[in-house]
Structure formats: structure tokens, C-alpha cells
Image (cartoon, grey):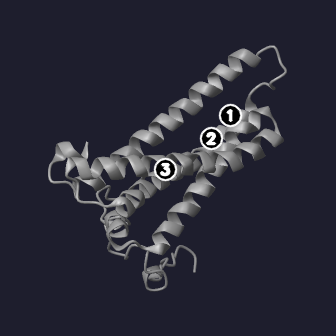
Amino acid sequence: MEGRSVPFKVSNLSSHFPWLPSKDSSLRRGCVCSKLPRRWVEEHSFAAVLFCLVTIFLGVGLYGASVGLWQGGRQAVYLSIKLPWVILLTLGTNALLNGILARLLGIQVGLRQTTLALLSAFAVFALIVGALSPVTIGIALDAPPPDSELEGKTHRHLILVHAGIIVFAGIISTGRLHSLLIGFSKTKSAAR
């Protein structure tokens, strides 16, 4: 048996979970232009909404904990609860504004579709910040404590790291939202 490798077989999860992409889908192949979010928006899938909400609460909650960890455990718990709700409040506000602007700019989406498109973009944001949370947890644990004489310098560095992560995740998720809206709009300028 030495030197022989056993091939790893993946079962077709799409048959058990219809909201997952199929095994030959562009999302599994790593294509950025996948049709999955567009299908979610068009079909008004409850499973997709649930998936996005769970992703937002887990990803942004974990990131919130990593942001507050430098100040202590209580602050980490507080931010892990507060930050997902702030994101959902922002999502609701953006959904209302974008629903109104979509009609004015000629994009053929209703309020529900606008909300679902934004929800998928915020889920992408949550995936990115959640994936980078172990890095920020490591930075927070390795940083000098808040009551040290390096507090000001450490605080500035942590703010810079967190701002960079949020900007990076925001740019990527906005790009996904833009590519999704291009498919619904009459012109590319309306999707901007």
C-alpha cells in the first residue's frame, strides 16, 4: 500500500442542497462572474436569504470579536453582537435608497431584488472580513496591552489594519454588486 494514493471523491451536494452551485458551475471553478447571485436575486430564494444572513452574522460577528479583542473579552463579545446588526441596518438603509434609485435610473429590479442583490454583496463582505479575522485576532493578541506606554501607537496601527481590511472587503463586494447589477440594467452607466 506504500506509495499508492486513494482518490478523494466528492459527492454531489447540490442534490441535497439545491441552493448550492452544481459541480460544474462557474462558482466552483473559481470564476468571478458566476450566475449564482443573479439566480438568487431572480428566484427570491428563502434558502439564499438565510445563507446570506447566517454568513453575515458569522463573518461580521467573528470580525467584530477580533476588533474588540485588543480591549478585552467584554469588548470582543460586545462588538461581535453589535457589528452584524450595524451591517444589517446599513443594508436596510441602502436597500431602500437603491430601490428608489434603481427605478429612476432604469434598472429593471424591484425593492425585493435590490435587497437580495445587496444582501449577496454584504455576504461577500462578511466572507472576506470573516476569513481575515484570524489574522486580526493574531495581531490583537500579539499587540502590547492597552494600558502600556505604547497604547497610542498600537491603537493607530490597529485602526490602520482594520480600515485596510474593511476597504478591501468593501471594494470586492461592491465590484460583485456592480457585476450583478450590469445584468439587470439597460446601460452600464446606470449600473454604476
Q: Nearer the viewer, residue 123 or 136?
A: 123
Residue 142 in view in this figure? yes
Residue at the spot x=15%, y=54% of the render?
186
Residue at the spot x=71%, y=43% of the render?
79
Q: Residue furthest top?
A: 149
In what quadrant of the picture does the C terminus appear? top left
In the rendered structure, the answer to whether residue 157 lies left or right of residue 3 reads right
Identify residue for label 3: 91
Residue at the spot x=30%, y=55% of the render?
180
What secondary structure is marked by label 3? helix
Total count of labels: 3
Identify residue for label 2: 135
Cα distance between the residues tagged 1 and 3: 29 Å
Cα distance between the residues tagged 1 and 2: 6 Å
Q: Amino acid at mark 3?
A: Leu
Q: Mark 2 packing: few (<14 Cα in 10 Å), some, or many (20+)?
A: some
In the rendered structure, the answer to whether residue 68 lies left or right of residue 156 reads right
Q: Nearer the viewer, residue 27 or 167?
A: 167
